Amino acid sequence: MTEPYGMDPTYRQRTVELLQSQLSNLIDLALMGKQAHWNLRGPEFRAIHLQLDEIVADLRLHSDEVAERILTLGDPADGRAGTVSAQSSLPAFPEGYLPALGAAKELADRMDLAVRKMRGAIGQLGELDPISEDLAIGISASVEKHQWMLRALTEK
């Protein structure tokens, strides 16, 4: 196969690896958001329950964008549960019922780590593929905004 858009094969491969890592984190975050959404308890339940739906919708959209970029670069995207579990760099989300503010804090902590990982990838993508870098910048800004909103709920 010819390298897409005349891209250097080594750059393309490294770009895809970086994007696949971010894809796994985004899918994992979306699953954590749903886990929290289902198991909230407490007086803040309704507001956080609805907010988590918005966050999960954005995370799913972002994971789709990353997967489509991987495909555009000529590789298959891998969002299978086993791959996400093996590749995600995020700690597992607590199981069972959680107080709504506690769940918001747990998710915000993982979003913070995901953004840190994304920022590391952005630095590398800038040297490899500016289109993928731009995509990662936009996604990190969105995740940062959601993370800030969760933090605003949980900090005093």
Image: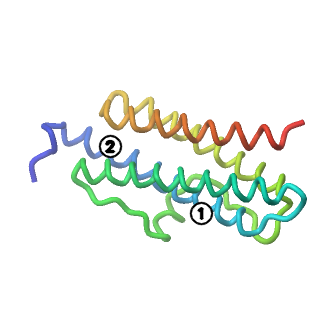
- Whole-angstrom CA distance, mark 1 to mark 2, is 26 Å
How packed mark 1 is, by other alpha carbons closer than 10 Å (few <14, some 14-19, many 20 or more), is some
Residue on which disc 2 sits: 14
The residue at 64%/64% (across/down) is 34
Q: Quadrant of residue 126?
A: top left
Q: Is residue 127 left or right of residue 10?
A: right
Which marked residue is nearer to the observer: mark 1 or mark 2? Answer: 1
Q: Eyeballing the image, is 117 above or below 63?
A: above
Q: Amino acid at mark 1?
A: Leu
Q: Quadrant of residue 14?
A: top left
Q: Circle 1 sits in a helix, a strand or a loop, which is it?
A: helix
- State the residue position of label 1: 31
**Residue 29: x %, y % from top left:** 59, 55
User: Residue 102 placed where, x, y %?
Assistant: 83, 54
Regarding residue 69, the answer to whether it shows in the image is yes
Q: Earlier in the sequence, mark 1 or mark 2?
A: 2
Pinpoint residue 75: horizontal percent, then vertical percent: 26, 56
From the image, which quarter does the N terminus lie in?
Answer: bottom left
